[in-house]
Image (tube, grey):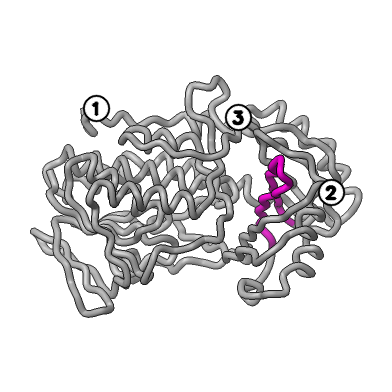
Amino acid sequence: MTDKVIVIGAGPAGAALALALHHAGIDCTVHERDDKPAEDGGHLLSVGANGLEALAAIGIELDGIPIPRLPAYSGSGKLLGELANGVVNGSAPTSLLIDRDTLRRTLQDMLAERGISVEYGKELVSCSATADRATAVFGDGTEVHADALIGADGVHSPTRKALFPDAPAERFTSILGVAGRAQSDRLSPTPDVVVNVFGHNAFFSYHAEPDGTVHWLGYAPGGLDKASTKDWKPWLLDVYGRDMAPVREALEQTTGPIDIRPVHNVANTTPWQRGRIALIGDAARTATPRIGAGTGLAFEDAVIIAKCLRDLPSPHAAFPVYQRLRGARVNRVIKWGRLYARPPKIRTPWGMWLRDRTWPTMLRAVPSMSSLDWLYQHRVDWPAPVLP
């Protein structure tokens, strides 16, 4: 078994990895580039049932808003159907909406309770490995050594770039993830659903609470120049201007700043490991963010790579097994996400009419479109050995 691991990145993936390693009896220290814990503005994040199951395998439970159903509407306002946001038969936890800041604080508190050290202001400059140890070098001139190093440092991962310098760089998709919070008494509460709207130009979703708070999320076409814009409302009202009234109401009644994040793609064409160094989550490859699968897959990665290090004699043996165990599932999620992520833009009334009449039939006729059991019904058997 591996004794000590360097973890790069203190986001949800890195924190979950450190907790899983601790659960496996493996010592680790987390190194984070930022000078202090990130603050994400309190916008909501979806954590799927599969991610909750992965954390439950190491004794961790999260609190959030249970969202068992995802009604899908056309931009015209027509109900197209309903997606199950979890396992249909209820054999797995219901997927949750969780405030990003709450999730971060919860995981950080768990690290502190277990005595797991997080060092901030540690920007990775390089990493390398020899036959018997891994080394990380940071921008402040310090370096650390351990049996293994795992990058959980996101889509712009310095670990990935150091490990595979010739690999394709992350690619901007010309899509911007946007999120905000509105206050409106015109939208009916949606206590156990997130309303999904397949608009004329872009996707939009919202969840309305009884007190009038509306949390919303969209994926809008736009260039990187929009990522820092303060005058966001005219832009988004133009993108969503032809869509159903609740979409426009949520945007018009939004208060405070919104979160704008460029969506990048990391192609799943490079190995996730080499020698004593490995990658998990978005550092290894990205899944389409709109299907809410990225966080759940990262939690799965964290628990399974910890099992591999627990059960196999060295990182050299553990990391290839980790990638073999994860490869087929991750590939399926990525391919499905590509199909789901980019519904065609509707440029004419005829196009919207056609969508409104064909999609309900497709959702009823193709179970894989309305039921995501294959995605959410995934369990990690922690006590079982990673290999038979």
Q: Which residue is outermost to the left?
A: 132
User: In what element is the residue under mark 2?
Assistant: loop
Q: Which residue is mark 1?
A: 384
Q: Which residue is mark 3?
A: 371
Q: Is residue 158 magenta?
A: no
Image quadrant occupied by the C terminus:
top left
Q: CB atoms at circles 2 and 3 under 8 Å apart?
A: no
Residue 114 sits above or below residue 382 on the image: below
Query: How far is the residue under mark 3 from the one under mark 1?
Result: 28 Å
User: In what element is the residue under mark 3?
Assistant: loop
The mark that comes first in sequence, 3 or 1, is 3
Q: Which residue is outermost to the front?
A: 211
Q: Which residue is mark 2?
A: 244
Q: Residues within 10 Å of mark 1 (few under 14, many from 20)?
A: few
Q: What secondary structure is the stretch in magenta mostly built from?
A: strand
Q: Amino acid at mark 3?
A: Ser
What count of labels does the image hold?
3
User: In what element is the residue under mark 1?
Assistant: loop
Q: Amino acid at mark 2?
A: Met
Q: Quadrant of residue 193?
A: top right
* Side of 139 relative to 355 (left or right): left
Q: Amino acid at mark 1?
A: Ala
Residue beneath the point at 14% across and 47% down: 2
Rendered location of residue 236, percent (x, y): 75, 64
> Which of 330/33 is in front?
33
Residue 274 can be seen, yes or no: no
| Residue numbers of the magenta segment | 202-220
